[in-house]
Image: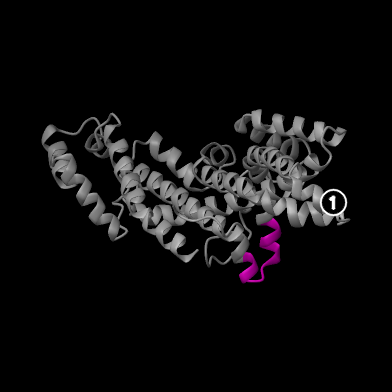
Amino acid sequence: MYSYIVKRILFLIPILLGVSFLVFLMIHLVPGDPAVVMLGEKATPEMLEMVREELGLNDPMLVQYFRFLKRLLHLDLGRAIISNVPVSEEIGQRFPATAELTFFSMLFAVIVGIPVGILAACKQNSIFDNISMLVALFGVSMPIFWLGLMLIWLFSVKLGWLPPSARITVGVELKRVTNLYVLDSLLTGNFKALKDVLSHLVLPSLALGTIPMAIIARMTRSSMLEVLRQDYIRTAYAKGLHSRVVVYKHAFKNALIPIVTVVGLQFGLLLGGAVLTETIFSWPGIGKLSYDAIMARDFPLVQGAVLVISMSFVFINLIVDITYSFIDPRIHYS
């Protein structure tokens, strides 16, 4: 198992290099001149040339890439063009908001999706199975922006139960420790802020977590059905074991690998795909930051945000792969 983990970690090096190269290339292929964005359309050719020289834009692409890699090793992602603040600082301030939203969205997706999938498999072709799979199909097909707007309309505008936007109500004091507001509220014992922060998390978490919840429910049902048809499950029932023991101890454990795969993939996708949700709910995360940076053609900021999201996705996949070896010790690298 340890050999598998070490080899899997070593395999990250070429992947991370490939990701960094693709991100670098993608930004440089986008039409537009960063010098014009920085100085505006009225800048003289001399001023534009001076800025290009300062940014190293006149150097060959390979030289620029190695310079980019060298800076990356020192966690230097350059400075944002519009705000002139270090990109790493901007991302560091926004990433906790996205991480917190993603975590609670996945928590909702897993807590609802897995039990629904298990029950649907155990009660195949029942009313519960048909209704739950119909709801799951509806959840997969629903556009996230439409769901977000409907949730705001119903729970904020009509019922007035939950706030429609932001992470915390203006005026509610919270001492920042990690910038993860729920964790900060717990660490400082500020339960008033905790209640307020959780109320702000409900709607965006529901909007972002609905599609993964539906996918996890469908995958859990499918995986459980496959396992429940195996001979050793029939043997377990024949030995007189309680159905709960057979389902949760024998069947669910062996159905876990595809479920873990889907959960890991969805977690990574949510980190990078929160742009719409964060824009609809004015959530100050990395998705909203990326959207604003793209609109402003702030190339270093876009590059930094895409890179961080891509790296997060790679590391989440690493965790998923390592989890395989704990679920099924027979798995090895070859």
Camera sees residue 56:
no
* Magenta span: 185-196
Res. 122 image quadrant: top right
Q: Helix, strand or loop at disc 1?
A: helix
In the displayed structure, would residue 133 be above or below residue 199?
above
Count of residue discs: 1
Could you say where residue 82 lies in the image, as x and y percent from the top left? 33, 44
Could you say where residue 262 lies in the image, as x and y percent from the top left? 59, 44
Residue 188 falls inside the magenta stretch: yes
At horizontal 10% and vertical 36% (from top left) the residue drawn is 46
Could you say where residue 62 lies in the image, as x and y percent from the top left? 18, 43
Camera sees residue 51:
yes
Provide the residue designation for mark 1.
237
Residue 47 falls inside the magenta stretch: no
**Nearer the observer, 166 or 76:** 76
Label 1 packing within 10 angstroms: few (<14), some (14-19), many (20+):
some
